Amino acid sequence: MAFLSDKITDIGLPAELSLFTVPPNQVAVDKIYFNECRPVNSFDTEDATIEITVPGQGNEYIDLRRSRLYVKCKIVKSDGSALAAQEKTGIINLPLQTMWSQIDTYMNGKLVSLNTSYYAWKAYLKLLLSSGDDASQSQLQSQLYYPDDDDMDNADAYGGNNSGLNLRYTFTQQSRIFDLEGPLYEDIFRIDKYLVNGVDLHLKLFRNPAAFVLMSKEASPGYKLQLLDVSFKACMVKVDSGILINHAEIMKDKSAKYPLNRTEVKMSTCPLGSGSFIWQNVWSNTLPTKAAFCFISQKAVNGGYEKNPFNFQNLVEEIALYMNGESMPARPMKIDVGTNQNHVTPFVNLFEAAEKWNKDAGLEITRSQFAKGYAIYAFSLAPSDLGEEYLNLVRQGNVRLEVKFAASTAETLNCLAYAEFPALLEVDQSRDIKYTKV
């Protein structure tokens, strides 16, 4: 045997022959437990804002990513009476997230979230662009996530052909009490690092109306989603006293730094009868690192029992995203929405944007599903998936979207735009919060 090259002569051993070494001892974390924090106000009415405080006193850090929300609820008629057997009423997908229109997050009184009313779509798109079958067929069901299929606007939860709505109906029929538990999808809850002690966390949860959250085929639908219990299970981390002392000493000169992706959702109206759609300055000044677009019925956005707000319609014949006048990341995508159903390029772009392309990993969306309510046009706009963790440079400019439809739009649509930007959260010695967002 010989070396492949005389200049490469380093040798190594497989791990199976490392017989005399053991992993290092973990001594930094003493204990991890969950602190159940309940609302500080009543939430008897549908329009009541739910406020929850997680105190930051003591020596515990907070694992934001492992913290989770718990909700117990039931569907009742507007007068409070129970649903009848076989009543054609159910709940939209991912209700733990989509029942909220907005979630404001504060750290020591500093707002660290973007207060818009599009949280339901933000959470849903984040999930679709990160999770695959393994998650959707197991742990995501804790949030009552069952993917919609076939006719997504079929509002008959009892006998319709949307299997996702039918499966959720088995939990909600006849006003059964059902509970939900899972993480929040606001940006700070995606941070991998522990939040240092001394930072109070305050949440404000604003609800979506029942006509948005529920779907019904009944002649005169009138319902409400009644919340019975809400709590936030903060994952507390008790660290070794030596770590506390060391961190306190370092923070005399440096702030604790938490890089994160800031996400933003916005909408623009596409009128009835439009053959094309141009959105000037979708984003200006700071450019996003990733973007995604989809088209939704305006009736569904406004809230209607007969419409699914997550039916992303497959209507586009050509779509292009221009960054500072240059089509990104390639020339405009051309799509056949007819019999051929040629949409492989936007389908592949989903995996590129999710950083799953060319890997043994997948998303929930299949090729056939793309045209059936999952038409998401994703764009990677900055270097990504290079194998290491790094920060992208902040770039300036403007973004323009140009779309040609296969046929004139049969109804007024909303174009939803989702984007990711680099951001940095800092906590100093006095526990002042600095949120650098671009």
Image (cartoon, rainbow, N blue to C red):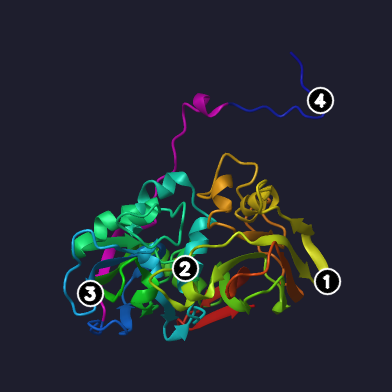
Up/down of 65 relative to 115, above or below: above
Crowd band around label 2 with a 10 angstrom C-alpha radius: few (<14), some (14–19), many (20+): many
Stretch of the chain drawn in magenta? 14-39
Distance from Cα at disc 2 to Cα at disc 4: 60 Å
Tag 3: amino acid: Lys
Which residue is pictured at 31% across the width and 61% down the height?
Answer: 181
Distance from Cα at disc 4 to Cα at disc 3: 77 Å
Tag 2: amino acid: Pro
Crowd band around label 4 with a 10 angstrom C-alpha radius: few (<14), some (14–19), many (20+): few
Distance from Cα at disc 1 to Cα at disc 3: 52 Å
Residue named by callout 2: 309
Residue named by callout 3: 77
Q: Relative to the observer, which residue lies in front, 318 or 191?
A: 318
Distance from Cα at disc 2 to Cα at disc 3: 21 Å
Tag 4: amino acid: Ser
Tell me whether circle 1 and circle 2 mark residues in contact (CB < 8 Å).
no
Secondary structure of the residue carrying numbered label 4: loop
Would residue 32 be visible to someone looking at this image? yes
Q: Earlier in the sequence, mark 2 or mark 3?
A: 3
Secondary structure of the residue carrying numbered label 1: loop
| Residue 38 in the figure: left or right of residue 352 | left
Would residue 27 be visible to someone looking at this image? no
Residue 128 lies, in percent from the top left, at 51, 56
| Residue 309 in the figure: left or right of residue 313 | left
Crowd band around label 3 with a 10 angstrom C-alpha radius: few (<14), some (14–19), many (20+): some
Front: mark 1 or 3: 3
Disc number placed over residue 325 in the picture, else none: 1
Q: Relative to the observer, which residue lies in front, 274 or 92?
A: 274
Furthest residue to the top?
A: 1
Where is the N terminus found, in terms of image quarters? top right
Disc number placed over residue 5 in the picture, else none: 4
